[in-house]
Image (cartoon, rainbow, N blue to C red):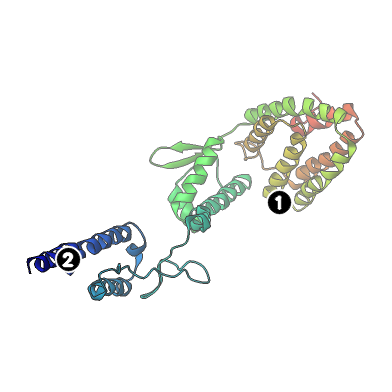
Amino acid sequence: MEQARARATARSERSPTTAEASPSRSNEWDEVSFEARDGSWASLPEQTRGEHSHTHAGSADRSPGTTARPPRPRAPEDGPTPSTAGPGSEPDETDPADRPPPSEHLPRTVQRHSVRGQILQALRTALIDGELTPGEVYSAPALAERFGVSATPVREAMQRLAAEGTVEVVPNRGFRITVRTPRELAELAEVRALIEVPVMLRLARTTPSAHWVGLRPLAEATVAAAAVGDRARYAEVDRSFHRALLSLAGNDQLVSVAEDLHRRSQWPLTGVAIPRRAELVADAAEHLALLEALAAQDLAVVRTLVREHFTGSEG
């Protein structure tokens, strides 16, 4: 009898009761809940979270040897489910490596930069056409109302123009259009000639004729813009033409400096009339003549054309 009682006691010690086994399942659920707080469940709708909670509560009816786990959400067949899905939707478990790059999720940033670029171009056009008066102060909110946008992209565009020397920042007021004199215009032209004359002479000696043929469409674009008196368009294609020429020298710093000088010399200056259509047509014609001289390696003509193009004299 005592032996039978001892065997029963041993069996009782080896077989844990349901109450004793439950802590292990509870620990497992604690781990699952932690994972949920850190990720997938955080975006689950209330209905879905309730379904998982019901599954947890019913786990006590399972056999002692079975571990209760929440049903894993299935991956959607047509790609990840958006986080804005309605009740009952499955959470997004897309692998991070399969997700699109961050830039595809930032349309507002791209749009803001696009607006800033458009405003910058519009301001440059207004400067070239004389719509913005040198010496006058313009506020970002006032210009923003004119363009139908917020003040932020206007302010960013004006800061860019300030870095180029086109406007000056006036604290608590806005931006003043830089005042330039005829003397400053002459100095800018002289510096441009000092840079571009030797470069063009070197290119005339070293560049095959076929390269100049490829630049003819840009030269013809300046002629077309000049013919209709479109000063803003002319300034754009004129800058592109000179940039393409200088790029053949293979010096990025040279191109950057020359382009900055080109921009500074474009805006209407105090006491200087806006160029007439005839003057634009004459300047554009010099582009075609320059290409022909470069292709013919006629150094004397190249030197004369470039200096006259900038300074109005052979110098």
Question: In the rendered image, which residue does mark 2 sit on?
Answer: 11
Q: Which mark is residue 230?
A: 1
For discs 1 and 2, the disc positioned in front in the rendered view: 2
- 26 or 187, nearer to the observer: 26
Task: Name which residue type carries label 2.
Answer: Arg
Residue 251: x %, y % from top left: 71, 30
- Tell me the residue at 67%/48% (across/down): 232
Question: On the rendered structure, is 245 left or right of 26?
Answer: right
Neighbor class of circle 1 (other Cα within 10 Å; few <14, some 14-19, many 20+) is some
Corner quadrant of residue 128: top right
Residue 257: x %, y % from top left: 65, 31
Residue 236: x %, y % from top left: 69, 46
Task: Name which residue type carries label 1.
Answer: Asp
Neighbor class of circle 2 (other Cα within 10 Å; few <14, some 14-19, many 20+) is few
- Tell me the residue at 69%/44% (across/down): 235
Question: On the rendered structure, is 44 left or right of 271?
Answer: left
**Picture quarter with the C terminus:** top right
Whether residue 135 is visible here, answered yes or no, is: no
Q: Which mark is residue 126?
A: none
Q: Secondary structure at mark 2?
A: helix
- 106 or 175, nearer to the observer: 106
